[in-house]
Each structure stands twice: as structure tokens, then as C-alpha cells.
Image (cartoon, helix red, strand yellow):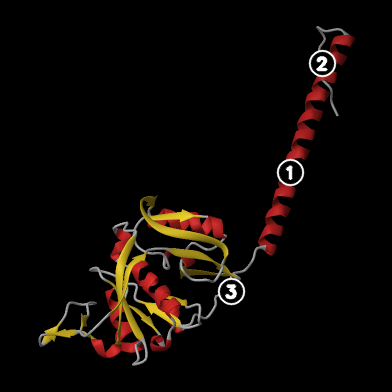
Amino acid sequence: MRIKIFIDKSIHENAAYYYELAKEIKAKIEGVQKAIEETKKAIASAEKARKTKKVRVKRKKEWYEAFHFFFTSGGKLAIGGKDQKQNEIVFRKHMEDNDLFFHADIQGGSAVVLKDGAKATEQEKKEAAQFAASFSNAWKNANAAVDVYAVRKNQVSQYAQGGYVAAGAFAITGAREWFKSTPLGLKIGKEGDRVFVLPLSHSKKLEKEIALFPSKKGKEKEDAAKYLAYNLEADIDDIRGILPSGKILAKI
């Protein structure tokens, strides 16, 4: 090791110079060592998080999960179309003679079929009516309530006066069972790892349950989905497709 001596300085000045230089070098080395240790900790923490991160297992979905759906308080399945095409599928493919067909008395809305609806209780029918009301254009309009009707399969047709009705529309004949001024409202929550939407009148209590209402002061659907995903600790993709169209006011 070679040390440079400044001949124009005294022995004490040379010693002082190298003392200060040594302190600077030591401080730099300590800083580098500290940075190395912090980097090691960060890497270890990231690796631990990667190993412990919950792996989302892709679950095989039931056929009815392609639609809006819920099970009534009595255990009956209700399914509703998410668009005009699905409305037709719900009616043509899945409605049977003993089922009930629900629709809000407004242009534009989900066609909801309550399986085995002919044997449903009044409470179950009110749940299906509220579901149909909430997934109709009444929500987009921020209506607090809307009339809903229910009919049997033989009263529903896609023909009228010898021709087809518009895509996704239905012609109704005969007497209807009315659910006047049905309030719009849903609740969203979890059961285990899954997220569900139920009519607000449903007696079932969900985990982390949040009530949903139509409101002009509510959040846009995408913003509402983000908010709900955060509060429910759920994947936003599991929420987007089960929300009604229009602004949403969430109440915890």
C-alpha cells in the first residue's frame, strides 16, 4: 500500500488528512453495506410474499352462472338475462311449464325466470320481482320503485299479430300477477370465497354485506366495481358482471 505524503504540510497535517479520508471511506463502506442488507431484506420479503400468495384456483362454473342468478329464501333458482340475447335463451332454453316469468313494466330489462315458480311462496315471488326490477332500465333511470309482473310460460310468446316481436322482447297474453311499486335494491357480499348478489328483500345474510341502490349521485358502474372489490377483498372481475347497469349507491 502506497501513501502519498504532502511535503508542504506538517506530519500532523498529513495525519489529519488521512484520518478524515479514512472516516469518509468507512462511512461509504457502511452505507454500501446497509444498502446491501436492505436489498437482501426486500428480496426475501418479496420471495416470501410470492410463495405465500394465495393461488386462485379456477372453479368450474355451473350453467346458470352465465346469467344473473340467485337462489330464493326457499331454495328455488332464479335466472335473468344480462342482455337481449340472454333474455331469449332464458325463455327458449330454460323456462319450463311450472316456472314463472318476471319482468319490470318498463322497456328494457332482464327477463327473470323463477324455476318451479308455480309453487313459490309470496316471499320468494317478491324476491324474484325485486331482482327483475333491479336489473331493468328503472335502475338506469335511478327510479326508487317500478311495477313488476309475473306470468306462466304459456302466456309468453315472441310472436304478435302473426309476426315476430323485436329481438329480446316478448308478447304477453292473459292476466298478470302484479307486484306494484316494487322497490329497487340489491345486496352484495361473500359466502366463502365467492361473491353473490341477492335482492335486498332476501333474508340471507352475506359476509361483508353491502346494500346497493340506484342513485343519480352514485358511482358509475366501473368505479362502484372497484370500490366493492376493495371492500369485499374480491377480484373485480367477479363483480363487474353481476352489477346492474347505471349509477350505484353502496351502503355498508
Q: Quadrant of residue 176?
A: bottom left
Q: Element at badge 2?
A: helix
Provide the residue designation for mark 1: 38
Q: Nearer the viewer, residue 230 or 6?
A: 230
Gap between marks 2 and 1 measured at Cα: 32 Å
Measuring 65% from the left and 63% from the top, which residue is drawn there? 53
Q: Is residue 197 visible?
A: yes
Which image quadrant: the N terminus?
A: top right
Provide the residue designation for mark 3: 57
Q: Element at badge 3?
A: loop
User: Mark 1 or mark 3, which is nearer the start of the sequence?
Assistant: 1
Q: Quadrant of residue 182?
A: bottom left
Q: Residue furthest right?
A: 11
Q: Element at badge 1?
A: helix
Q: Is residue 68 visible?
A: no
Gap between marks 3 and 1 measured at Cα: 34 Å
Q: Position of residue 38 (x, y in %)?
A: 73, 43
Q: Position of residue 121 (x, y in %)?
A: 44, 82
CB atoms of marks 3 and 1 within 8 Å: no
Q: Residue furthest bottom?
A: 97
The relative height of residue 174 versus residue 212 in the rendered view (above or below) is below
Q: Nearer the viewer, mark 2 or mark 3?
A: 3
Mark 2 surroundings: few (<14), some (14-19) or many (≥20) residues within 10 A = few
Three-letter code, disc 1:
Glu
Provide the residue designation for mark 2: 17
In the picture provided, is 47 more to the left or to the right than 87?
right
Q: Position of residue 211 (x, y in %)?
A: 48, 60
In the picture provided, is 29 more to the left or to the right than 84?
right
In the picture provided, is 55 more to the left or to the right than 19?
left
